[in-house]
Amino acid sequence: MLAVLLLSGCDGATQELASIGDTPAATLPVPGASAAAPGVTLAPGATTAPDVTLAPGATPAPAATPAPAATGLARIGVAPSRRDCPASGLSTVVWTQDSAMGLRDITLRIFNCGSAVQRLNGYPALQFRDAAGKRLPIAVVKGTVDGTLTDPGPRPFILKVDQVAECVLTWRNLTLQGADPLTASAVRIVPAPGLAAQTIPFTVDTGTTHQVAVTAWRKPTAPA
């Protein structure tokens, strides 16, 4: 009970610790501190741990360093903030993804988070990379896989400040004998000729098809 009350001031810490196990971690009082924090009542029969005295010349063990947060995964459906806007003024994110019956599709949205008008025309240029950043021989075709989605085709349009455009990537995860499957960990995208490239982390498991289809840029079919 004491350990939970002392930790409850940390955002979310009490709930996280409670999920690890039913037995609360023991806490050691600071030498010379009172038996209980002001306002805290100990359960009947409970006692605090005795003060810990270090041997002469000994030093306390350093606090453990928490493991770094996991990286390399795109946040799905999260619009970029202006403070995260790259120098190009355009930010591309994974907006939706779907994988059913071996057919994959991912919607990429590009946000004009800068202060100038941007122009798009046609299809983005794509390259696929493995976890080490090496380019993979995955072919990019214009359109969709098996006509499962509608490709609006290339057309120029202006992307004003705070406006959004999108394209859709589709592929099939099929594995056949005679070829090695390829799985990319990230895609490098150039929205239009002359614009800066961006690298977005997400998994593209093409199996042995080694092919991804992409539609032309279009105005979003659903609200941003």
Image (spheres, rainbow, N blue to C red):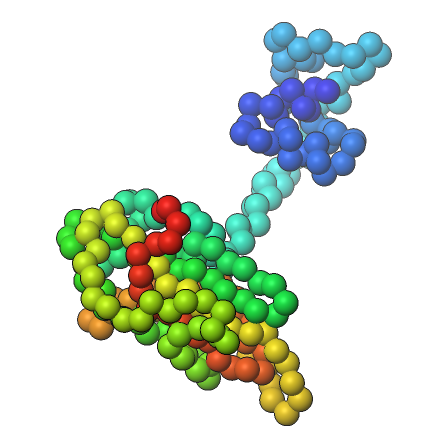
Relative to 56, 90 lies left or right? left
Q: Whole-percent x and y of residue 69?
A: 53, 50
Report which quarter residue 12 is drawn in. top right
Q: Nearer the viewer, residue 82 or 100?
A: 100
Please state which of residues 51 and 137 is positioned toward the viewer in this rendering: 137
Residue drawn where x is 31% and y is 71% of the image: 153
Considering depth in this image, is 9 or 101 the residue closer to the camera?
101
Report if residue 161 is visible in the image.
yes
The percent coordinates of residue 218 (x first, y second) are 31, 61
Looking at the rendered structure, the number of numbered marks drawn on it comes to: 0
Q: Residue furthest bottom?
A: 178
Q: Position of residue 189 (x, y in %)?
A: 34, 69
Compared with 188, 97 (above or below) is above
Residue 186 showing in the rendered view: no
Residue lying at the far left in this picture: please name it.
Answer: 116
Quarter of the image for residue 213 reads bottom left
Question: Does 198 sit left or right of 194 as displayed?
Answer: right
User: Which part of the image, by quadrant, shows the N terminus?
Assistant: top right
Residue drawn 68% across the image and 24% down it: 3
* 49 relative to 132, above or below: above
Report the front residue among 22 and 76.
76
Vertical order, 99 against 6 (above or below): below
Q: Residue at x 71, y 36 (%)?
A: 19
Report whether 166 appears left or right of 45.
left
> Going 21% across and 56% down the picture, which residue do you hit?
159
The furthest residue to the right: 45
- Taking 81 as reference, is 102 left or right? right
Question: What x and y, as percent, mark residue 63?
Answer: 58, 40
